[in-house]
């Protein structure tokens, strides 16, 4: 069995997949990666199914030793990923030698990085998912964040013996800034808000507070006025729901949110913009922009096309056994030996040029 | 209860099917009937159904269906609610050690109600409570039917840690803490029963539409049950609801 040794757990590193589906009616939170786009990209880069489990790394990254060789991909926030002290490229497949150590030198942008290994992390499936729910202590690695001394089991490699190289198109790599425009569709309780409240919500910058976490992103800013009450008879919640309680401050519900809630929700962040909140840090500013459902769905299909582009073309270096493949282009540009073919292959498809 | 459902957009992956804005058994039953009707259909784009007091949240895959199509599916299912048979509700008995170290607020509730502690226990354990829905935390039941005589408001300052299995009251609500968590409920007792167990599927002892009855137990009996649960030799008493 292939394993990875945890030498240092970092600030808050957890095993996550895309979440626990089908148990919300029992009050079980969905959990899963805060930035689902980054995790899906990482999994596709190493040849995993979208449902494979990877690591969600928060701000200060862990230190991991690969016992056997393997493929990894690091996506999401740039926390300074390195292998044996040398920087590695993000958003592409990287081959790792047996015994190599992956670490993070420090945050440059964003909040959460994602690490996928070929074969996925093979912790037990709990209620249909390998995601960690730290609130209740179930799932993932023993229901908690990783610590020094832990050992992660990896699943079977999809393409044993062949080193596969994939990359996200450079133009598709998200940029993480300190000022984000986050698109929402109104509802379910937008009717509970005064016109002035709705205008304030759309027209003002909101600053993320340090009380933000995997349960929700809290914001400070102009108070959003209700028509009468902020309370409703408890009903269901979704990822990205913008809850406004009596204090008039918005909270965007995220991965570990409670499945039901008793406060009015003025709007819901569209799926393709959830990553903007997952990558925001306290002090970052957000403006909410209203779109309609058709636009949200159009954007969702466009995002699927970006993720599908990772799968084609895949350049298989079948002549190179995995043990001898190292990230020869660590720290340098795309022109390094072995990677040039892949860059040419992507350019030749003409993808991206027409958009 | 509204005659026709209202549909509320909840982002690009879910729609709320709302039947009303009050807590009552008829509305709640309607929600659960709709959930049962939709479950039977196995529509490919419908991902998950979450029933709450008076609405059903329908989670769907927007790459397979649109919200409009989901609404059409719901309206079709509504035509056939009369054909849906809900499973017979169960009554799950919850052995509860009232008062003492595990029920530190029992005296306060008695004082607030102006009755002896024994009477608080008799009132609390004297009826079956409908599980209207589950939420807030894994395994947490929203129970209906608490007597207004013992419906004391919650603590103004919540405790930072409430032990797992604590049985409490917060105004018209009564319930059981499924895990250790901060909480503001008035704690009147403790049950060794694990109402949430992630290693079981389903991970809960009861679900929306079932009933709970708190059964007064001594602390010694409760501890014995706790040992049996840890050893895997205890099974809950479950009856059919009359």
Image (cartoon, coloured by chain):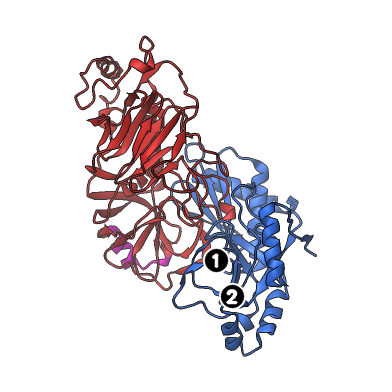
Image chain in blue: B
| Residue A18 spot, x, y in % from top left | 46, 40
The chain letter for the residue carrying disc 2 is B
Assign a secondary structure to mark 1. loop
The quadrant where residue B240 appears: bottom right
Q: Is residue A334 visible?
A: yes
**Residue nearest the viewer, comparing A137 with B206:** A137
Badge number at residue B163: 1
Of all residues shown, which one is farthest toward the front?
Answer: A149
**Residues at circles 1 and 2 in contact by the CB criterion of under 8 Å:** no
Q: Earlier in the sequence, mark 1 or mark 2?
A: 2
**Disc 2: which residue:** B101
Query: At x 61% / y 61%, what residue is drawn?
Result: B133
Magenta stretch: residue A182 in it? Answer: no
Does residue A142 appear left or right of residue B114 in this picture?
A: left
| Residue A151 spot, x, y in % from top left | 45, 37
Quarter containing the C terminus of chain A: top left
Of all residues shown, which one is farthest toward the top?
Answer: A319
Magenta stretch: residue A200 in it? Answer: yes
Image chain in red: A
Of badges 1 and 2, the one in the foreground is 2
Does residue A318 appear left or right of residue B85 in this picture?
A: left
The chain letter for the residue carrying disc 1 is B
| Residue B60 spot, x, y in % from top left | 52, 44
Q: Can residue A53 be seen in this view?
A: no
The quadrant where residue A191 appears: bottom left
Q: In this view, does A41 lie above or below A178?
A: above
Assign a secondary structure to mark 2. helix
């Amino acid at each position: 069995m292939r394993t990875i040794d945890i030498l240092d757990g970092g600030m808050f590193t957890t095993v996550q997949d895309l979440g626990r589906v089908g148990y919300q009616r029992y009050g079980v939170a969905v959990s899963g990666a805060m930035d689902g786009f980054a995790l899906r990209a990482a999994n596709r880069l190493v040849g995993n199914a979208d449902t494979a489990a990877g690591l969600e790394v928060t701000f200060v990254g862990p230190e991991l030793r690969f016992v056997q060789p393997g493929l990894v991909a690091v996506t999401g926030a740039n926390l300074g990923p390195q292998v044996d002290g040398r920087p590695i490229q993000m958003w592409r497949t990287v081959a790792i030698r047996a015994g190599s150590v992956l670490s993070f030198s420090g945050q440059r942008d964003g909040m959460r990085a994602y690490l996928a290994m070929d074969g996925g992390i093979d912790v037990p499936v709990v209620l249909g998912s390998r995601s960690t729910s730290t609130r209740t202590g179930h799932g993932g690695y023993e229901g908690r964040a990783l610590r020094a001394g832990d050992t992660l089991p990896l699943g079977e490699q999809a393409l044993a013996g062949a080193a596969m190289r994939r990359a996200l198109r450079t133009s598709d790599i998200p940029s993480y800034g300190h000022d984000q425009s986050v698109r929402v569709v109104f509802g379910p309780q937008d009717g509970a808000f005064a016109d002035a409240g709705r205008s304030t919500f759309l027209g003002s910058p909101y600053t993320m507070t340090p009380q933000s976490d995997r349960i929700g992103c809290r914001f400070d800013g102009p108070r959003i006025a209700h028509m009468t009450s902020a309370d409703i008879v408890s009903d269901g919640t979704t990822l990205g729901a913008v809850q406004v309680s009596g204090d008039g401050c918005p909270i965007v519900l995220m991965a570990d949110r409670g499945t039901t809630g008793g406060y009015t929700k003025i709007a819901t962040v569209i799926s393709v913009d959830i990553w903007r909140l997952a990558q925001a840090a306290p002090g970052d500013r957000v403006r909410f922009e209203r779109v309609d459902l058709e636009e949200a769905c159009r954007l969702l299909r466009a995002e699927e096309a970006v993720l599908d582009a990772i799968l084609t073309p895949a350049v298989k270096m079948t002549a190179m056994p995995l043990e001898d493949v190292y990230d020869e282009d660590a720290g340098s540009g795309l022109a390094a030996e072995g990677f040039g073919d892949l860059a040419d292959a992507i350019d030749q498809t003409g993808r991206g040029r027409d958009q | 209860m509204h005659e026709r459902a209202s549909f509320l957009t909840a982002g690009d992956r879910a729609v709320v099917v709302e039947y009303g804005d009050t807590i009552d058994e008829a509305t709640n039953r309607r929600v659960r009937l709709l959930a049962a009707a939709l479950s039977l259909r196995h529509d490919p784009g419908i991902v998950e159904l979450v029933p709450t007091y008076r609405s059903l949240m329908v989670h769907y895959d927007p790459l397979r269906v649109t919200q409009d199509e989901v609404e059409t599916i719901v309206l079709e299912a509504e035509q056939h609610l009369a054909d849906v048979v809900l499973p017979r509700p169960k009554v799950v008995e919850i052995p509860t050690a009232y008062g003492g170290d595990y029920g530190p607020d029992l005296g306060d509730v008695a004082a607030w109600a102006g009755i002896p502690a024994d009477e608080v226990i008799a009132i609390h354990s004297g009826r079956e409570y409908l599980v209207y829905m589950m939420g807030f935390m894994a395994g947490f039941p929203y129970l209906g039917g608490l007597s207004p005589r013992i419906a004391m408001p919650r603590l103004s300052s919540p405790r930072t840690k409430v032990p797992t299995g604590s049985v409490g009251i917060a105004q018209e609500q009564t319930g059981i803490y499924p895990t250790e968590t901060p909480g503001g409920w008035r704690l009147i007792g403790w049950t060794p029963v694990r109402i949430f167990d992630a290693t079981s599927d389903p991970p809960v002892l009861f679900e929306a539409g079932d009933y709970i009855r708190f059964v007064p137990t001594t602390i010694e009996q409760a501890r014995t049950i706790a040992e049996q649960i840890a050893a895997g030799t205890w099974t809950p008493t479950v009856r059919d609801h009359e």
